[in-house]
Amino acid sequence: MGIGDDCAVLEPDAGRVLLATTDLLIEDVHFRRRWATPADIGWKSLAVNVSDVAAMGGRPRWALIALACPEGVGIDEGEAFYAGVQTLAREHDVAVVGGDTAASPGGWIVNITLLGDAAGKPIMRSTANVGDVIAVTGSVGRSAAGLALLEAVPAPPDVADATRADVTAAHLRPRPRTREGQWLAAAGGVTSMIDLSDGLATDLGHLCEESAVGARVELARLPVSPTVHAIAKALDRDALAWATGGGEDYELLLTCAPGAFERLASGLAAETGTRLSAVGEMTAAGDGIRYLDAGGRAVAVRAGFEHFVTGRARA
Amino acid sequence: MGIGDDCAVLEPDAGRVLLATTDLLIEDVHFRRRWATPADIGWKSLAVNVSDVAAMGGRPRWALIALACPEGVGIDEGEAFYAGVQTLAREHDVAVVGGDTAASPGGWIVNITLLGDAAGKPIMRSTANVGDVIAVTGSVGRSAAGLALLEAVPAPPDVADATRADVTAAHLRPRPRTREGQWLAAAGGVTSMIDLSDGLATDLGHLCEESAVGARVELARLPVSPTVHAIAKALDRDALAWATGGGEDYELLLTCAPGAFERLASGLAAETGTRLSAVGEMTAAGDGIRYLDAGGRAVAVRAGFEHFVTGRARA
C-alpha cells in the first residue's frame, strides 16, 4: 500500500465540500469465493463506494482499503485483490492512500472508505418535488440476473456465452456512473439522486421518504435488457422482479422537473453514451409508492433486497 | 446512525491538511467477546483510529463506522456498541457522520475510518535525526498486562481489584493522546512521532526505518507502572517483555532535539498532566536498534506484536 505513516495526509481543494462513504463486504454475505475472484472482489468493493460518490454528483478521489483474509490465502491472491481495486481506481481517478490488513478467522472481509469532493452543492436524496419525473440511467435487473446465474447449480445449459458474460459482469464488475453523475449534477435540473444499490423499490423508497413525497412507476417503462429476459427464461424466473427488487445495479435513480427531462436525456446520451429513461413521476406523499402494469393496474412489487446468508442461496 | 444520503457531506477548514486512517477489528483476532463488552469494542475501535491522528499532531474530526454482527446479536448490544463509540467520540470532539451495517457469518467485525486535520505540517515518522532523544508519553506495558490478565484462565487469585482495573482498562478502553499530540506538534522541536500500537520495539523499528537511523534504548528508563509489575508477578511473566513487545498502549513515541526535551517534558506535564520520559537516543543507521540493560549490556527484546488467533491464546 506504500503508506508509511499513521494517517494518509491529503490536501482537499479549497472551496469544495468533501464526500465520505464506507462499505463493508463480507464473504458469503456479499459474495462467494466460488464465483468471485480476488480481483472481482477488489473491483466491486471499490465500485460500490465510487457509486455512492457518483450518486451525489461528486468526484471520487481517495480510497482507504482494509482487507482481512483467512489463513491459507496466498500472497498472489492478495495481490490480485489489490490489482482489481487499482484497475477500477485508475478508471475513476481514485488514489489508494492508505489501509489496514488483518487476519480473518472466517472468510474474506473488505472495507473500503472513499473520499470524494463536489464543486457545488451535492445532489441529495431529500429534495425531490411532487410532479418531478423519475428517471434511471442504463438498465435495471442485470446484476440480479447475473447473481441468479452465478448461484444456479447446475448452470442452465442454454444460455449464450455473451448473455452470461453480460449479466455476470454486471454483478461482479459493476461500472459506477461517475461521469454521468457529475454531468447530471452540473447540467442543472436534477432535483434528487441516489444510486441503485438495494434495488429500485427500496432505493426509490429512500428518495420518497427523505423527500416526503410519493411515487408512481410504470413498470413497462423500466429499461430491462434482452439479456435479463433471456436469463429469466432460462432459469424460469421473473425479470421484472429482478428489475424492481434485485439490487446492485449501481445505476443512478434521479428526479427532475418535467421540463428538464428531454434536455438531460439527450445531453447525457451525447456526453457519455448512457441512456436516461423516464419511468414515472413523484406524487403526493399520501399516495404512497405505486407500481402500475402496462394496463395501468397497481401491482405489488417486492421491495427490499436481502443479501444471501451463509449456506442459503437467495430465494 | 442518522445518515440519510449516499455520502456524508463534510466541510474541511480551508488551509488545513486532511488526515485519514482506517482500522479493521475482528472478533477472536483483536478482541474476544468473553471479556470485551459491545461498549468496550465500540470505544476501542474508535480509540485506535483517534490515536493515529494524535500521532501526527492532528485533530480528530469525523468518523465512519461499519459494523457487522452475527445472527442472534440483539439490538441492545448494537446500541451498546454505538454508545461506546459515542462516549469516546464526545471526549475527543469526533462527529460520527456515516457508516454501514451488514450481517456477519462469523463473529463481530468493525471498521472505523477517521478523518482529522492539522493546522501546520503533520509530524511524520520519517524525520528523526541522529542524536535525537527518544521519548514516550505515559507508561508502557499496561495494555499487554491487561490482555494477559483477561486471557488468564483461571484468573490469578491474588491481584488487587484496583490493579486489575488499571491494566484491563488500559487494554479495553485505551485513552488516545489527542491533547498531548496536538500540544507536542504545536510546541516545536518534535522531529518525528508514532503511536505505540504494535509495541515499542516494532514501532521504534518503523521510526528508524522511515527515518533511516538507528536507536539505542535504555531498558531501565522505560516507564513501567507498578500495576504492570504486580500483574507480571502474579502471572509469572516478564514485565519488560510487555513494555517492549506488548503493543496497544496507544502512547506516543517521539523524537526531539536533545536541547528540546526538558522544555517539552515540563510543558506537556503542565498542560496535560502527562509524563514524558526520555528512554534513549537515535543513532547512526549502521548501529541498528539496540536495547541496553541497567549494566549497559545489549540484550535481545522481542519485537513484533502478534494478535492472537482463533482458539489460541498469545504465548
Image (cartoon, coloured by chain):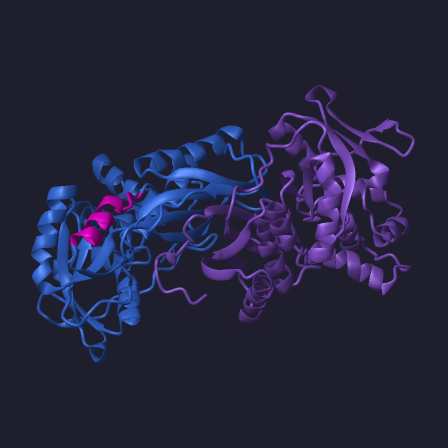
Chain colours: A purple, B blue
- Span of residues in magenta: B174-187
Question: In this rendering, is residue A230 above or below A290?
Answer: below
- Count of all numbered marks drawn on residues in the image: 0
Q: Nearer the viewer, residue B180 or A13?
A: A13
A81 relative to B291 in the view: left or right:
right
Within the image, what quadrant is residue B200 found in?
A: bottom left
Within the image, what quadrant is residue B269 found in?
A: top left
Q: Nearer the viewer, residue B139 or B177?
A: B177
Q: Residue at x 80, y 31 (%)?
A: A291
A273 relative to B6 in the view: left or right:
right
Within the image, what quadrant is residue A219 found in?
A: top right
Residue A45, percent from left and from top: 59, 55
Q: Residue at x 63, y 56 (%)?
A: A44
Q: Main secondary structure of the magenta part?
A: helix
Q: Is residue B27 visible?
A: no
Q: Nearer the viewer, residue B27 or B129?
A: B129
Residue A243, percent from left and from top: 79, 43
A119 relative to A240 in the view: left or right:
left
Residue farthest to the bottom? B286
Residue A220, percent from left and from top: 86, 39
Question: In this rendering, is residue B246 above or below A190?
Answer: below
Residue A215, percent from left and from top: 73, 29
* In magenta segment, residue B257: no
Location of the C terminus of chain A by quadrant is: top right
